Amino acid sequence: MTDQSGPDDFIRIRNVSKHFGDFVAVDGVDLDIGKSELFSILGGSGCGKSTLLRMMAGFETPTSGTIEIDGVDVTDQPPYERPVNMMFQSYAIFPHMDVEKNIGYGLRKEGIPGEEIAKRVDDVIRLVQLGDFRRRKPDQLSGGQQQRVALARALIKRPKVLLLDEPLAALDKKLREHTQFELMNIQDELGITFVVVTHDQEEAMTLSTRIAVMDRGRFLQVGTPKEIYEYPQSRFVADFIGTINTFEGTVTRVSDDTMSVDCPDLGGSVRALHDDNIGVNVGQQVCIAVRPEKMFISVERPEDDEGVQVRGTVDDLGYLGNLSLYRIRLESGRRIQVSRQNQRRSARRFVEWEDEVWISWRPRSAIVIRGES
Amino acid sequence: MATARRTDRTWRQVTIAIPYLWLFVFFLLPFAIILKISLADPIIAQPPFTPTFDAQGALSVTLDNFLFLLTDKLYALTYVKSVLLAMAATVSCLILGFPMAYGIARASPSTRSLLLLLIVLPFWISFLLRVYAWMGLLNNYGAINNALMWLDLIDQPIQFMYTDFAIFIGLTYSYLPFMVLPLYATLERMDLDLVEAAQDLGASRTRAFWDVTWPLARAGVIAGCLLVFIPAMGEYVIPYLLGGSESLLIGRVLFDEFFVNRDWPLASSVAIVLLLLLVVPIVLLQRNQARNEEQPT
């Protein structure tokens, strides 16, 4: 154990588990989070992400393992002694105090003199743009305003780490997008390390410098949004982030940089790139995964014969404005989803229901995931 | 459609009218009668008070009964003692009831319903019977004294029965559920995140309790205190059974004036004063609360 924490291990989580009776909520998790990172823990409900966050805040004690923040072991510290503040999903704004009192609460508990509290409250109120509402009671605020109060209250103590539990879940779509960028700006301005827990993959993608995808108490993959999206290491991660079409298959041939995979759903052998480190052997079960936007849809057979080409019928199509979604029934009967940018302005549809089309993609667009045995 | 709406409105008026009618017949009307009797003179007749209008049809009222209550020190002392005892019982119910309510509200849902059942269970047994049971416990040779003597803590039985202490115990025991239930209702609704938020912002457990839990439980505390204080003030059975003959409480005085002395007008004025004693603070409290709630923004 070192006293000085490097830039990449400002928060060090080592082999942390949490059991509730027989139920294992968090199962031997290791994680390093760097200083000033905006780190997201992403997962479905019950995956253990909130429990992990609550252990960082000090509301739960790990069954085993340690948590260090800035070189200090905080595993057994009570919440009120940790250099960590939390923004609750419910916001947890004190209903009997006005906005100003709520925001200043943490400083009052520190015994900071009144004038300084007033000054610092002023500063954060300006930061979150709540100037006109300082005397309001929480029940007189909109959801967005309450969210700002919760954020300001958690920020005012200048914590080393700010924990955010589903920070945007209660906001409507427009406000959520706006607030996302605001959160990023505030994080950037203050340089505080943010750890966000969310079930919303879009939120995690736009906000974070890095994402940890969690399922059943374990991390499946930790990486930048790009890595997680473009190079998922498991079926679960591929499915969880965005939409993806997956085809089970068997490896029939492996060469230096490519391989052939026999996929019954695609009606034969397809070529895929031999990605980095995933060492595959002939006869192995793998899964070819292709994102809808990486697929091309055309009426004529595409000329590029390097790529994978399959025939299908348009089952359903949806116009979303910026893009169109197609559900295609392949000859094998398998249904897949393809999306296409609507680059031309046209009121006419490019294909119709029940049209015969060609679906193609470049081998390098396909992700090869080793099959779960 | 229009007729449907009209029947709707009629029904609404009927549903509102029922409780008003109830209050009118069973509260306001009796109150008016009591008020009328309190302004009469006692006579030996049937009914035992002078009519409000005499034979000539002239109004015949007197404030003698109220003046008597104010000048006779005995009555003033009785009121003060009743208030003090009821207050003591209220405070002890609060001290005992708050942790109980808190524990129930934080228990797992299945345990919670069991615990609530246990709180309400005593109501299945007659109130009178339960007070009698306390006589058995507090007696000189009752369970408590026997236990204390057996443990060699005392040589002589302690005189519990027929003391104000016995009344206090009886009041606390009998009215504890009325404190626990409203407290439970407010604590159960309270968002636990609030307490955690306070701790997260640097408040210790105790501090978080006083900063968050206590102020937010205020409505329940007030409701519980009123539900204990008001009936404890006028309680008759408990002082009669557990208290001594000299422990004069207002409920007892009321009973004696009505049924022993047959001085209905004086008894009525005792009741009116009791009512004022109870109503005035409640009205003030409610007004204060209403003002707190609509603070300027």
Image: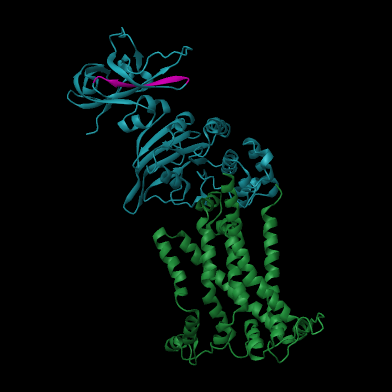
Chain colours: A cyan, B green
**Magenta span: chief secondary structure:** strand
- Say if the magenta span includes residue A322: yes
**Viewer-closest of A255 and B234:** B234
Above or below: residue B47 compared with residue A300: below
* Residue B15 visible somewhere in the drawing: yes
Q: Residue furthest top?
A: A303
**Viewer-closest of A22 and A123:** A22
Tell me the magenta residue range. A321-331
Q: How many numbered marks are there? A: 0
Above or below: residue B82 compared with residue A253: below
Q: Quadrant of residue B214?
A: bottom right
A131 relative to B144 in the view: left or right: right
B9 relative to A290 in the view: left or right: right
Q: Residue furthest front?
A: B3
- For image coordinates 30% across by 18% down, the residue present is A313
- For image coordinates 37% across by 14% down, the residue present is A351
- Say if the magenta span includes residue A22: no
Q: Looking at the figure, which quarter contains the C terminus of chain A?
A: top left
Q: Looking at the figure, which quarter contains the N terminus of chain A?
A: top left
In the rendering, at what x and y percent does residue A25 appear? 36, 47
A310 relative to A143 in the view: left or right: left
**Viewer-closest of A115 and B102:** B102
In the rendering, at what x and y percent does residue A105 appear? 61, 49
In the rendering, at what x and y percent does residue A165 appear? 48, 42
Above or below: residue A23 compared with residue A148: below
In the rendering, at what x and y percent does residue A6 appear? 45, 35
* Residue A289 visible somewhere in the drawing: no
Q: Quadrant of residue B159?
A: bottom right
